[in-house]
Amino acid sequence: MRIILADDHPFTLDGTKVFVENLGHYVEGSTNNGVSALLLIESKSPDLAILDINMPGMDGLEVLQQVYEKKMKTKIVLLTMHKEISIYNKANEYNVYGYILKEFAHSELRECLIEIEKGNKYVSKDLLESLIINDFENNDFITVLSSSEQKIVKLIGQQFTTKEISSMLFLSEKTIERHRTSIIGKLKLPKEKNALLKWAIQNVNRIK
């Protein structure tokens, strides 16, 4: 992939450039602020831009918003120190493709780029678990989910597969999948692989 990098810390920027190039990708350009990052994206139209959220001029989230609103094709990966659900939700609203904690950046960036090449999105594993726990530990989801959905969540939390659940409840697998989609939407879970499973396992004992 052709990639743009932006980070206001020279050491981090240089390290990411070397790391990305060693994975076989081509770095089109790099910069230390959000304004020039957006200009690079507009002029070079790279496949991907890896941006630090905290940068002078424009932060990474603001660059992401501009890319989204201008309907540019460049996919955005954000590197962040933040675990706040509000920041992640805003990034998700603007169609972020990767959201990685800086403390785990190099250990997860490889996997992130692989997933993006497959057409998937990627959220740092530690961050995903933190988002789920922080956002829902005090949430009364019983008032949000129907009794059928609660039953399905309980079975998911007990780690039954969609096929097994459909057999147990005498429903089609397509019906179970529709329920899963509805549950994810009602709980506002990150649309990432296994997010519902992780949440259900953490909360299975709260369901009667």
Image (spheres, rainbow, N blue to C red):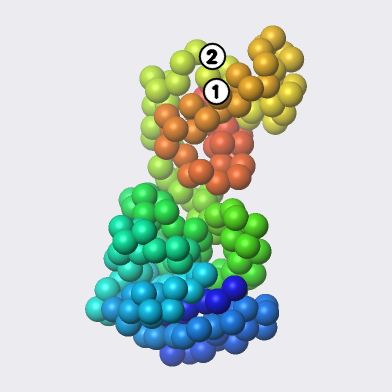
Q: Is residue 145 visible?
A: yes
Question: Which residue is more in the foreground, 147 or 136?
Answer: 147
Check contact, mark 2 vs mark 1: CB within 8 A: yes
Q: Is residue 196 placed above or below 179 in the rendered structure?
A: below
Query: Which residue is labeled 2 in the image?
Result: 148
In the image, residue 57 lies at what x, y percent? 25, 78
Q: How far apart in space, not on screen, are marks 2 and 1 (Cα)?
A: 9 Å
Q: Is residue 121 placed above or below 13 in the rendered structure?
A: above
Three-letter amino acid code at the position of disc 1: His
Q: Describe the element under mark 1 as helix, strand or loop.
A: helix
Three-letter amino acid code at the position of disc 2: Ser
| 90 left or right, relative to 185 | left
Q: Which residue corresponds to the image point at 56% horizontal and 24% vertical from the top-left?
A: 178
Q: Which residue corresponds to the image point at 59% horizontal and 60% vertical from the top-left?
A: 116
Rendered image quadrant of residue 54: bottom left
Q: Which residue corresponds to the image point at 55% horizontal and 71% vertical from the top-left?
A: 105
In the image, residue 88 lies at what x, y percent? 39, 54
Q: Is residue 13 visible?
A: no
Q: Which residue corresponds to the image point at 39% horizontal and 26% vertical from the top-left?
A: 140
> For the C terminus, which image quadrant?
top right
Q: Describe the element under mark 2 as helix, strand or loop.
A: helix
